[in-house]
Image: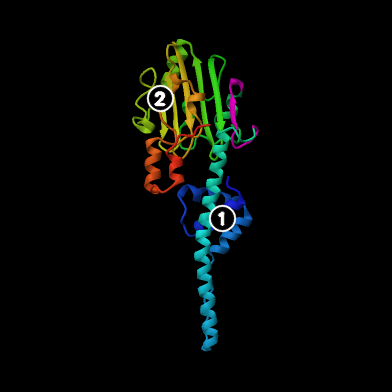
Amino acid sequence: MLDCEVVRDLLPLYTEQMVSEHTAELVGAHLQSCPECAALCRSMTSPEPAVQFHTDTAQQFAAYEKKQKRKFGRKVAVPAAVIGALFFWIFSKFWLVLGAAGLLLADSALAKVKTDTDPAHYLQYMGENADSDYKFKNRSIDERIFPEALTDNMDVREYKMVYYNPWDPQYLSYLTVAYSPEDYAAEKERLKKRGIADYQGSYGVTGFPGGEPLAVAMDSYYGYVYAINTPEQENTITYCEMIFCNKFMDLDYTKYMPEEYLPLNFNARSSNVSKQEEWIKQHPPHGSIYEYYSEDYHP
C-alpha cells in the first residue's frame, strides 16, 4: 500500500490520467481508505471558476495575468511530481541493491525473506482464511490446484512457504504429498478438472520434470501454480507456486525451490525476455534505469 506522501506526489499525474493502470489501481485503493488524500484529489479535479472580464482595462489585464500564472504553476507542478516519483523509485531500488550487498540491517522489513517449513501452518497461507499477507496472493491465478487442507490420510514429505516483499509481495511454496493408490487416483482426477493452461514459452518454459504436468495455472504477469508427479516417487504429487508481479521475481527462486520441481527452462529474473521486451517498448534505452533491467538482481 502506498503511503500518503507518495500518493500526493502522484496525484497531479493521476488526475490527468498520466499513470499506468497498475499505479492508478494503487492510488485509487489508497484514496478509498484516506479521506485527506481523497479530499486533495477532489480539489485538484474541481472545475476552475469562470474568470469574469470587466470593461476596465486594468481589471482585464490583472485577471489575464492571474490565469497565466495559474497555468504556468500547473506546467511546473506536473514535471516536479514526475521527478519526485522517479526519485522515490530510484531511491527504493538503491536500498534494494544495498540489501543485496548485505548493508541493510538484518531485521529490515525491506530485505527480510520469511520462510516456514511447518505443514501445521498450511492454512495460515492458503485459501480465503489465510493470514492477511497471504489472503490475496493468488491474484488472477487459480491456487486451488493446491489441496484445500492437509488431512490425516496425506503423508506430507516436504513443505515450504517463502514470502518476500521488497516492493510488491512475492510468494514461493511447494508441497509434496504421498498418497495411497486409491487416493492418488482420486487426486489425479481432481487435478484433471483444474486443467492445464497453455504454458509453452511463457517465461521460457518448455515443459515440466517427469513429463506432462497434472495441472497448470499460469498468468503472464503474475507467475505459475502447478502440480507434477514427484520425480522417482510412486503415488506422490508435488504442488508448486511462484507468484509475483510485473513479470519478474526479485527473489532468487533457485535458492528456495528444488531444481527438480522447477519448470524446465523457467526464467522469471528481471532479464527474462518478456520483461525486457515490455520495458524497452515503454522506455527506450537511455540510462541507468534501463541498465537496472539488464542485470540480474536476486536477494
215, 245: nearer the viewer:
245
Question: 242 or 90, which is in the foreground?
Answer: 90
Local crowd size for mark 2, using a 10 Å CA cut-off: few (<14), some (14–19), many (≥20): many
Q: Residue 191 falls in which quadrant of the image? A: top left
Q: Which residue is mark 2?
A: 263
Q: Nearer the viewer, residue 133 or 67?
A: 67
**Number of the front mark, 1 or 2:** 1
Residue 39 place in picture, x, y as percent: 60, 59
Colouring of the image: rainbow
Residue 161 coordinates in the image, percent (x, y): 55, 26
Tell me the magenta residue range: 106-120
Query: In the figure, 177 relative to 107: above or below?
Result: above
Q: CA distance from mark 1 to mark 2?
A: 41 Å
| Quarter placement of the N terminus | top right
Mark 1 residue crowding within 10 angstroms, few (<14) / some (14–19) / many (20+): some
Frontmost residue, 150 versus 73:
73
Q: Amino acid at mark 2?
A: Pro
Q: Which mark is residue 9?
A: 1
Q: Position of residue 118 (x, y in %)?
A: 60, 21
Q: Main secondary structure of the magenta part?
A: loop
The residue under the point 48% across, 60% down is 16
Is 156 placed left or right of 189 in the picture? Answer: right
Residue found 59% across the figure and 60% down from its top:
40
Q: What element does badge 1 sit on?
A: helix
Q: Amino acid at mark 1?
A: Asp
Q: Residue at x 64, y 34 (%)?
A: 105
Q: Is residue 11 above or below residue 240?
A: below
